[in-house]
Image (cartoon, helix red, strand yellow):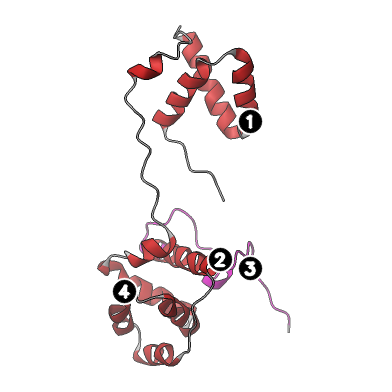
Amino acid sequence: MTAPRQLPGQARRAALMAHALPPADQAWLLGALPPARRLVLEGLMVELQELGIPADPGLLDMLEPSASPPPAVTGVAALHALPARQVGTLALVLQREGPGVCASLLGMRPWPWQGALLQAVERDFADTVRGAAARAPAPAFEAALCNALLSEVEEATGTASRPPGLPLWQRACGVLRPIRWRA
């Protein structure tokens, strides 16, 4: 899991805070950071020194309070809130993945768009999904499947930030490279 991306304002605030620390505490803090974050923070601290900004913790009080960004909606919550305009895209993604994945998804919980989804897929596909006995998956698999489906919908609508990759079921299971089965 990757750490949340730090916003520029937050990085500057962190640099001002670190700049106000005693040298021993600064060294400890910088040593505890991942290399990429350390480089950013060091660069901003050098900038503060070059500008002649005093190492005064009181300067932080003059800044507006830092409002942390709302957490990103992912997994089940994001799929639950799927906009109606994307249900057709989800239907295409699920038809590509197969009725088993669709049955697993619909077996998780009653989705607000479930009826619209079953109307959007091909009739034979919908009949197969309705006939499948899906049991609720483990919570970790549920979250992974929802995130993978959202990724597919974003990819299909051109809003994805990554190129096409592994099949959905492999991404949901955490596979890092394609599985090649031998006969």
The kind of residue tagged 2 is Arg
**Do labels 3 and 1 touch, CB within 8 Å?**
no
Residue drawn at the location 58% of the way across and 13% of the way down: 22
Residue located beneath label 3 in the image: 178
Residue located beneath label 1 in the image: 32
Disc 1 from disc 2: Cα separation: 32 Å
Residue located beneath label 2 in the image: 171
Residue located beneath label 4 in the image: 88
The kind of residue tagged 4 is Gly
Q: Quadrant of the C terminus?
A: bottom right
Give the mark, 2 or 3, whose residue is nearer the N terminus.
Answer: 2
The region drawn magenta spans 155-182
Crowd around label 4: few <14 · some 14–19 · many ≥20 (10 Å)? some
User: Splitting the image into 4 quarters, where does residue 125 fall?
Assistant: bottom left
The kind of residue tagged 1 is Ala
Give the mark, 3 or 1, whose residue is nearer the N terminus.
Answer: 1
- State the SS at label 1: helix
Residue 51 position in % (x across, y down): 44, 9
Give the mark, 3 or 4, whose residue is nearer the N terminus.
Answer: 4
**Do labels 2 and 4 touch, CB within 8 Å?**
no
